Image (cartoon, rainbow, N blue to C red):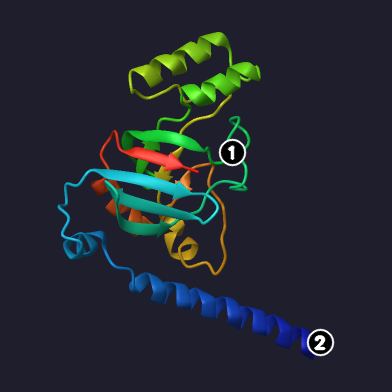
């Protein structure tokens, strides 16, 4: 009985370790964005657009209608649900844009999205999640294409970011782990590419 348990646990460890090594090898094979741009004969200063699929866990980088590169992503909580308040840890769905770019101590380079938008605020007001004053502040930010309030009960600080100091582990996991606060996570090398490629104002569609 004990021997069978040891064999069983040993098999699990070997399987997980093998998948971890497979993840490392797969990441080594990843083609860098600059090489993709050269192959597709696109300039480095192309006009980007990001389309994020929550069901397939993919982030697609476009240049106009041309698909440039696809990245694996993870989210916060169950991606089948959409963000409704500051406590749910879900990733929002809708049309956004990059309203700020920040370099943080924990996650490094981040692309901040303009969540909540007027559409999120309309829902929040109808459901009595936010006050009329908060609604007007979000509406003003939306109309002026500026950074919205991030401290209402709708939540905020939804970003595209890397894995931080846990990158080696998280990018090579043999399973999907939705670990963020509702933000969209890629690996550290990929956020470097996206940070350089996507200026403030870049359109981001999440569905």
Compared across the picture, whether 15 is left or right of 94 comes to right
Mark 1 vs mark 2, CA separation in Å: 46 Å
Q: Residues within 10 Å of mark 1 (few under 14, many from 20)?
A: some
Q: Tell me the residue that label 1 is attached to.
A: 82
Observer able to see residue 106:
no
Q: Is 91 situated left or right of 33 in this image?
A: right
- Vertical side of 125 occupied by 7: above or below: below
The residue wearing badge 2 is 2
Q: Residues within 10 Å of mark 2 (few under 14, many from 20)?
A: few
* Residue 139 visible, this orientation: yes
Mark 1, secondary structure of its residue: loop
Q: Is residue 154 left or right of residue 193?
A: right
Q: Residue furthest right?
A: 1
The picture places residue 32, in percent across and down from the top left corner, at 26, 64
In which image quadrant can residue 25 be found?
bottom left
Image coordinates of residue 89 in percent, x first then y, are 59, 40
The picture quadrant where one finds residue 122 is: top right
Indicate which disc residue 107 carries: none
Q: Residue furthest bottom?
A: 3
Quadrant location, the N terminus: bottom right
Residue 85 image offset from top left, x and y in percent: 60, 29
Q: Could you say where residue 9 lies in the image, as x and y percent from the top left?
A: 70, 80
The residue located at (65%, 79%) in the rendering is 12
Which element is circle 2 on?
Answer: helix
* Residue in view at x 59 percent, y 21 percent: 124
In the rendered view, tell whether residue 8 sits above or below residue 113. Answer: below
């Amino acid at each position: 009985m004990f021997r069978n348990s040891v064999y069983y646990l040993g098999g699990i460890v070997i399987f997980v370790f093998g998948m971890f090594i497979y993840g490392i090898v797969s990441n080594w094979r990843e083609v860098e964005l600059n090489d993709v741009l050269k192959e597709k004969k696109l300039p480095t200063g192309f006009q980007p657009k990001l389309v994020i699929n929550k069901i397939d866990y993919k982030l697609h980088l476009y240049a106009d209608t041309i698909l440039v590169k696809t990245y694996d992503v993870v989210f916060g909580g169950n991606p089948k649900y959409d963000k409704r308040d500051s406590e749910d840890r879900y990733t929002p769905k809708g049309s956004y844009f990059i309203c700020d770019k920040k370099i943080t101590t924990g996650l490094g380079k981040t692309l901040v999205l303009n969540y909540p938008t007027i559409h999120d605020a309309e829902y929040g007001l109808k459901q009595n999640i936010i006050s009329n004053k908060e609604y007007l502040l979000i509406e003003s930010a939306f109309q002026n294409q500026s950074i919205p309030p991030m401290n209402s009960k709708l939540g905020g600080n939804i970003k595209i970011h890397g894995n931080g100091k846990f990158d080696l582990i998280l990018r090579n996991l043999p399973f999907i782990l939705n670990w963020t606060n509702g933000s969209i996570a890629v690996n550290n090398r990929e956020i470097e590419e996206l940070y350089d490629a996507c200026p403030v104002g870049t359109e981001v569609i999440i569905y």
